[in-house]
Amino acid sequence: MAEPLLSLSGVTSGYGQIQVLWGMDLAVNAGEVVALVGSNGAGKSTLLRTISGQLAPSAGSIRFDGTEIGGSRPDIILKAGIAHVPEGRRLFRGLTVRDNLLLGAYLRTDKQAIADDLEWVFELFPILRERQRQDATTLSGGEQQMCAVGRGIMSRPRLLMIDELSLGLSPRMVEHLGNALVALNKAGQTILLVEQDVMTAFELSNRAYIVENGRVARTGASAELARDPTVSDAYLSI
């Protein structure tokens, strides 16, 4: 059996003396959409920050495409092929939508491929083409999320990690973004999705991990977890 594209084994991490993750195990296979779900403070965002190099694990292993990356600098991890779309979008004020998108490709030198990927982002999110000369921070919340996801795509990652896709957005905008992720995945993009809206996460993903108090509490096929009464009672009725 092929090794997962991303695999975590016994990963411990946190902020200074505050430990958040306690021996996390996780795997993402190439071509999958895998969701991380759980309540606020469960450790989902900390896990993404640890994978992308913003936090260094204090124990355990993080392997990407067969190579250990745990504790590597964020730029090294980005070069390896992991892009992180952070919670809160974090677009650059004073820069246009187009410039924010192109910042996602700042480590690349393949000009024609960058132009092709920019066109792909505009096809996924047509409103960004219309607003490409506008200051990105003046967009609506949903449009800013499109821009943040598009910026991640522009690095041409092998793994795209998205933190809280739907937070604060209208159901219609969430549906639009979800359709874009489905299109991305059909085009071959592997995605690791953090999502507090458990039903949205299950609908978009192949597999899911339920995280509680910095540990994996449950994992399995998303469709099976959605039908599990204990999962429904704990998460879907909230």
Image (cartoon, rainbow, N blue to C red):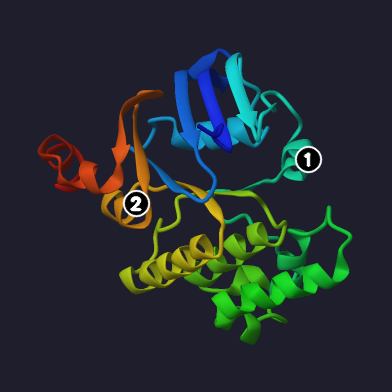
**Residue 212 in the image: x percent, y percent?**
33, 27
What residue occupies the far bottom of the structure in this picture? 130
Residue behind mark 1: 75
Q: Is residue 122 shown above or below 198? A: below
Q: Amino acid at mark 2?
A: Ala
Q: Is residue 197 shown above or below 150? A: above
Choose between 36 and 213: the one closer to the eye: 36
- Say what secondary structure mark 1 lies in: helix
Q: Dividing the picture into quarters, in which one does residue 100 lie?
A: bottom right
Measure how far apart labels 2 and 1 are at the Cα level.
Answer: 28 Å
Q: Is residue 23 shown above or below 109? A: above
Q: Residue at coordinates 57% horizontally, 82% vertically from top-left?
A: 126
Q: Is residue 8 left or right of residue 170?
A: right
Q: Is residue 88 visible?
A: no
- Say what secondary structure mark 2 lies in: helix
Q: Residue at coordinates 46% horizontally, 23% vertically from top-left?
A: 25
Q: Residue at coordinates 36% horizontally, 43% vertically from top-left?
A: 207
**Residue 182 in the image: x percent, y percent?**
44, 64
Q: Is residue 205 left or right of residue 186?
A: left
Q: Is residue 132 visible?
A: yes
Q: Residue at coordinates 61% horizontally, 14% vertically from top-left?
A: 58
Q: Amino acid at mark 1?
A: Asp
Q: Which mark is residue 201?
A: 2
Q: Dividing the picture into quarters, in which one does residue 152 lie?
A: bottom right
Q: Dividing the picture into quarters, in which one does residue 235 lie?
A: top left
What residue occupies the far front of the structure in this picture? 1
Q: Is residue 234 left or right of residue 147?
A: left
Q: Is residue 203 shown above or below 121? A: above
Mark 1: few/some/many CA within 10 Å (<14, 14-19, 20+): some
Closer to the N terminus: mark 2 or mark 1? 1
